[in-house]
Amino acid sequence: MKLLQTRPDAFVFVLGRREMALFLNALRGYPVARPKPPALTLRDAPDDSAQALLVDSLAEHKRENAVALRKFLENPAHIRLEGTAMRLTIPRDAVEWLLQVLNDLRVGSWELLGCPKPDEFQVTEETVLNYTVMETCGMFQMSLLNALAGNDTESGSAGPAAESEEPV
Amino acid sequence: MAAAKPSSQPGPGPGPRLVPVRRNTRGSIPPRSPFRHPPSAIRIQSASPGVAEPHVAPAIGKTEKTADKPDLEPAWLVICWDDPVNLMDYVTHVFQVVFGWQRQKAEYHMMQVHNNGKSLLARTTLEQAEHYVHQLQKYSLHATMERES
């Protein structure tokens, strides 16, 4: 995934067909049914209604993001074939919710894997799909963040991850 | 037509006029109010020129109860916790968006999360803390609010 053009209204990326297939396949999994419910606090909940409000608010927010994602993918102006490559146009006002969608997929996949620590990552036949989604989303997140920061760099290439791509 | 200018002269009629004391909704005097005197020490202004202005002596010796701490809302801490899945650049970006911080400050807090396992992002009211936690969790960060002990 390479940033081709930064326009006032959008970022234009060029992707290989396999990259695009990975990207679309990952996005189709949204929203992930997260096994861990969101928690407002670890110990001092103000009251039960505040916790319920958080759960409802996040669920509603995911529904809104899912609608925005569906419209985005249905719009031919955003994804089109250009020669042997694919052109992906992401409007600037879509960047924030797309980052949220990608990270929800990444964190959700990690939770489905049982929240492994970095030294516990084990790719097996059962876990490979969740790892693929997790890493694919991380790769596209970095591409978007680099584009926002004005770094015209190709990300997601094979090889060791850059320092900035390390998890917190 | 010009708007009526409020007169600085006292209103008609004899007799003293109390200087208004601003009160909060609970009826008590706000702790940081400039009018922080017991009612017995309120100054009385005369409406008639040339008449001596009576003063009520301040209640010397009476201990004024300091109500600073109890009147304040308890503070809530917004904390972001470490996890091995959120990317460093992503966390920095989210802090910038949610709190409006410059990149340097956002990176400082991101590094605190990375190195110390958590970072205190804000100390604020209940409502504001809830707002921040909602925003951070929309980005799938592990953030909570805790009552300040």
Image (cartoon, coloured by chain):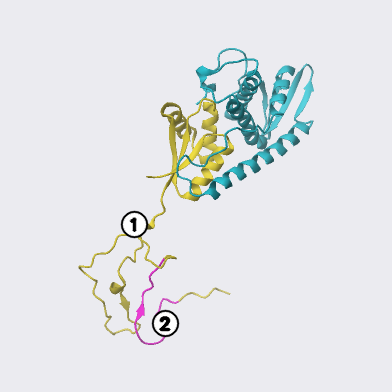
Chain colours: A cyan, B yellow
Q: Which residues are magenta?
A: B7-23
Residue corresponding to mark 2: B11
Q: Residue furthest top?
A: A159
Give the residue furthest to the left: B61
Q: Dot 1, how many residues are within 10 Å of its Cα: few (below 14), some (14-19), or many (20+)?
A: few
> Would you identify the image quadrant in which residue A14 lies?
top right
SS at badge 1: helix
Q: Position of residue A104 (x, y in %)?
A: 61, 32
In the displayed structure image, the side of residue A146 where residue B8 appears, left or right? left
Q: Is residue A143 above or below residue B3?
A: above
State whether the magenta stretch is mostly helix, strand or loop.
loop
In x, y percent, where is residue B148?
39, 45
Q: Which residue is mark 1?
A: B68
Measured as percent of width and height from the top left, residue A138 is found at 60, 24
Residue B146, image quadrant: top left
Q: Residue at x 51, y 22 (%)?
A: A117
Q: For mark 2, does the 10 Å Cα neighbourhood hold few (<14), some (14 to 19), or many (20 or more) residues?
A: few
Task: Quarter of the image for the N terminus of chain A: give it.
Answer: top right
Q: Nearer the viewer, residue B30 or B12?
A: B30
State the residue in front, A168 or A87: A168
Kind of residue at badge 1: Asp
- List the single residue furthest toward the bottom: B14
In the displayed structure, A143 sits above or below A54; it is: above
Give left or right: position of B51 versus A137. left
